[in-house]
Image (cartoon, grey):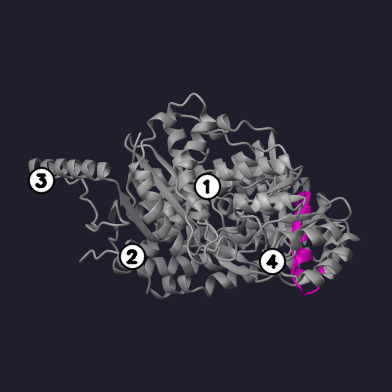
Amino acid sequence: MRITEARIFGLRIPFVETFSHSASARARSDSVVVRVTAENGTVGYGEGVARPYVTGETVESFVSCVVNELWPAVASADYAQITRSPDPFSALSSISESLPDHSANGVIAGHGARTAVELALIDCLLRSERLSLGEILPPKRPAVIYSGVITSGSIDAAVRHARYFKLFGIKHIKIKIDAANPVERVAAIRRAVGPDVSLRVDANGAFEPVTASGVLSSLGELGVAVAEQPIPRGDPAELARLSSDSPIPIMADESLVTLADARALTATRACEYFNLRLSKCGGIIRTLQMARLAENAGLRVQLGSHVGETAILSAAGRHVAAYIDQVEFVEGSYGKLLLAEDISRDSIVFGHGGAAPLLRGPGLGIRVREEVLRKYAHNIITLVSSAGLRSRQRRNKNVSTDEERHPSAGTTRKSSPRKVCHGSGNCSARLFVQAADKERKDRFRTATRLCGHSHGE
Amino acid sequence: MAIRSLVESEYAAQTEAFASSDIFKSLRSGKAAREVYDEFITRLCRTHLNSPQILAFLYSLAPPRVASLIEHNMLEELGRDEVGISHPELLLRLARAAGFDQHACAELEGQSQDELRHLATDEILFGSLREFGLTVLLEVTCFEWMLSRMARLIAGFLCKHRKLSPEALLWFTHHSEVDQRHAEEGLDAVVEYAAYYDFEEQDFRLLSEIVFRENVFLRRYFGKIEVSRHTLMLSL
């Protein structure tokens, strides 16, 4: 089966509050959603996030990677054998392997873009077979239990958030810390939630190795379960040295982006936990490969998330969290607790105690509300394969014919204005820019810049 | 714990933020486009069409001393009291007067029912209906408090700038009268609920903050999230 169209939605969904940590502050989701359409009309949705301080990707490099590297591979692939494969897990692996790796100056890995496309393909191909991802990745547990995360900010605000979580019955809380009073902060939260709640900290690389050791010793006395990324990404040996002296198990996050990172971390015994995040790790298959490496090395796993993920990444994360054996902590599925509006018809948010049910619907198991995608999209780019273009031309021709025959029918919409890239080189697929409103020119410029060819007006 | 004054000041702050919002002022001054008025009418109808069911839910949780007040409020909404005016019917009358055809009205009712469905299917963060019921009660009584003070004003600008007849706006004028009583009863109900279910002050305040972390009127009537505080909001 061939994919005939991909549509990229650059989103800006406001948060109900600003989320901040030592590396960034964020007031809205800037996820990028990719929707693919198969020749039989089935659609699938994927999502990725661009985090310069994690994978090195910007939203622009992310979109450019989809347009210029991933889409040509998708448009030229025939997924017929994959959907008919007797071994569905290998089928998922084949989808992942069909996508090229992206690297460029300043980009550790183009994993956000890769994840968005991989998830969209998996969702689409599973839906066309009426299969749930849960049938491919059988769950090992009846529900997924999520953690709460307390953002940076004043200690008073942090304590208040901790009390919310206690009220919600959350059993695991992650506290964002930086160089400003980390021990006092954790101590105040410990007093608020009592001894039965598991606390862990995430420094997002805020400490120098020389200071990190002392902070970890103090935090150990407060019963902190895990310390995530205390020092910046760098030589795994440095993290290993810190880990060997630390009273608290160390979790690698920013240090763990690629499979090579995972191998280096296990080889140097630099940590006791991996924080796996789908968009950071390059999609479901890469994440599972890293989980396998962790298992073989005796490491435990956190299935983490990026702030501002929508229901698409949350749904994929839930399947993966339910599937991986050694998952100890899970994050995400915050939906409308953080976003002004989420894009799925049904809520993805966990309930009391952080518990969330397994998803059983086809594909990733959620129903995307396209009108919400459009509402929050600041940029929409449509890519059409040659086969899709021929199909569109046939359809448009039929529409014209119908309108000529029934000029008063008035129910058939003409296609939106669009531009076709006639260039060659990287832009092997036809690039359409859908821009029928006041943002048309801006969008058009964006797309022109991304594909690098002159489209004319 | 001075629950009554705490809650009333919260309601006043919510109402003030609503009345002073740019979008509300544009409706009031007549500067808003017709579509904005229609969106407001759509969302208002969608919000309040469910009132009888929401009140039925609250009635099921009501402490004995205020159960009859909530029961009467529910019957009043249904038009099964001595006055006999069905409030959902008044809302549909408003929608029809604003130009909504049969299909659009059916869509409104469908959307409203969909919200009720979500109420039943979405995961609940709280450990019991005790907490969930309080959050619903706080929001419902906050609306009654606001409508008792603002309904006549809203009817006025819809009449003047959207050219709707007094007959079409009966839902507002009716609410401006009955909600003055409901607003007081609502405060009584909250105080009684907190006492009956043994809420500690800290938990009551946390739940109140969760309900009012955004402006409930702007969210329901305009789909806008207005941050009512900077630091006291749920953070994840």
Looking at the rendered image, the quarter that the C terminus of chain B falls into is: bottom right
Q: SS for tag 3?
A: loop
Q: Are marks 2 and 4 on the same chain?
A: yes
Eye-nearest disc, 1 or 4: 4
Q: Position of residue A4 (x, y in %)?
A: 32, 42
Instruction: Give the alpha-carbon distance from disc 1 to disc 2, as whole Å.
Output: 24 Å
Q: SS for tag 4?
A: loop
Q: Position of residue A132 (x, y in %)?
A: 52, 32
Can residue B80 be seen by looking at this rendering?
Answer: no
Tell me the number on the disc at residue A232.
4
What residue would you read off at disc 3?
A407
Instruction: Give the alpha-carbon distance from disc 3 to disc 2, as whole Å.
Output: 32 Å
State which tag comes first along the sequence, 3 or 2: 3
Check if residue A161 falls in the magenta segment. yes
Q: Position of residue B235 (x, y in %)?
A: 68, 61
Q: SS for tag 1?
A: helix
Q: Which residues are magenta?
A: A156-182
Drawn side of residue A6 relative to residue A246, left or right: left
Q: Residues within 10 Å of mark 1 (few under 14, many from 20)?
A: many
Q: B20 or A275: nearer the eye?
A: A275
Relative height, residue A249 to residue A448 (above, below) = above
Drawn side of residue B173 relative to residue A143, left or right: left
State which tag comes first along the sequence, 1 or 3: 1
Q: SS for tag 2?
A: helix
Tell me the number on the disc at residue A443.
2
Q: Residues within 10 Å of mark 4 (few under 14, many from 20)?
A: some
* Pointer 4 chain: A
Instruction: Give the alpha-carbon distance from disc 2 to disc 4, as whole Å.
Output: 36 Å
Check if residue B16 falls in the magenta segment. no
Residue visible at 36% across and 61% down in the picture: B165
